[in-house]
Every structure is written in C-alpha cells, then in structure tokens.
Image (tube, grey):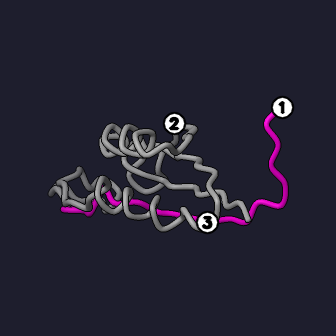
Amino acid sequence: MMKLIMAIVNKDDSRKTMPALTAEGFSVTRLATTGGFLMDANVTLLIGVEEEKVDDVFAILEKTCKKRTQLVSNSFYGTSFPVEVTVGGATVFVLPVERFEHL
C-alpha cells in the first residue's frame, strides 16, 4: 500500500534532506511554506512511498533535520528581551494513499 509522507522541515535543514532523499531513490516535491508562530521559512516535503519504505524515509529525516535553539525577538510577549526557542527537527504526517497515478 502506498503512503504519502508530508514532512515540514526548517528551510536550512531541507538543504541536506532533499539530496539525501533523492540519493536513496525517493521522489520528493518541495513546497515553500511559512510557520505560524515564528513566521519563519519552512519547507513541506511530499514523498510518496510504499509502506515498507516509510521507516527508511524517517531515518533520513532524523539524520538531516536536527532540533536546535535560536534567540528570537520576543515582541510576541511584549518585552524587549530575546527569547530562546527550539527550531529545526521535522513534523511528519503519514497518510494512506487510496489511488496513485502518474499521468
């Protein structure tokens, strides 16, 4: 059964993630997206795979998408001190594919 993996990754991480996925033979569609809280650039990757390959994709995502901290302006909180937040990593959804055709 086919699965659609939707992986939301930091724009900087995508520069390592996409080549790593394509090197392993995965086809990837890249969509430029923006995160809600920090309004920072993200990338949403769409990856169609057979069910038995899902763990292989996760291994690549875990290797190339690392969480890290970053100081950001905290005007959201109404003070002038920078706030340390966690960025990076990946938010991943795995969806069943009812039908797939390449036309």
Check disc 1 and report the residue beneath it.
103
Quadrant housing residue 31? top right
x and y percentages locating residue 63 in the rendered image: 29, 58
| Pointer 3 or 2: first along the chain | 2
Question: Disc 1 marks which amino acid?
Answer: Leu
Name the residue: 44% across, 64% down: 58
Check disc 2 and report the residue beneath it.
32
Left or right of 82 on screen, residue 25 = right
| Secondary structure state at the residue bearing disc 2 | strand
Q: Nearer the viewer, residue 69 or 60?
A: 60
Name the residue: 52% across, 46% down: 44
Question: Disc 3 marks which amino acid?
Answer: Val
| Pointer 1 or 2: first along the chain | 2
Label annotation for residue 41: none
| Secondary structure state at the residue bearing disc 1 | loop
Of tags 1 and 3, the one toward the viewer is 1
| Secondary structure state at the residue bearing disc 3 | strand
- Separation of marks 1 and 2 at Cα, in angstroms: 24 Å
Residue 34, placed above or below residue 71:
above
- Separation of marks 3 and 2 at Cα, in angstroms: 19 Å
Label annotation for residue 94: 3
Range of residues picked out in magenta: 84-103
Name the residue: 37% across, 56% down: 60
Residue 31, placed above or below residue 86:
above
Question: Disc 2 marks which amino acid?
Answer: Ala
| Pointer 1 or 3: first along the chain | 3
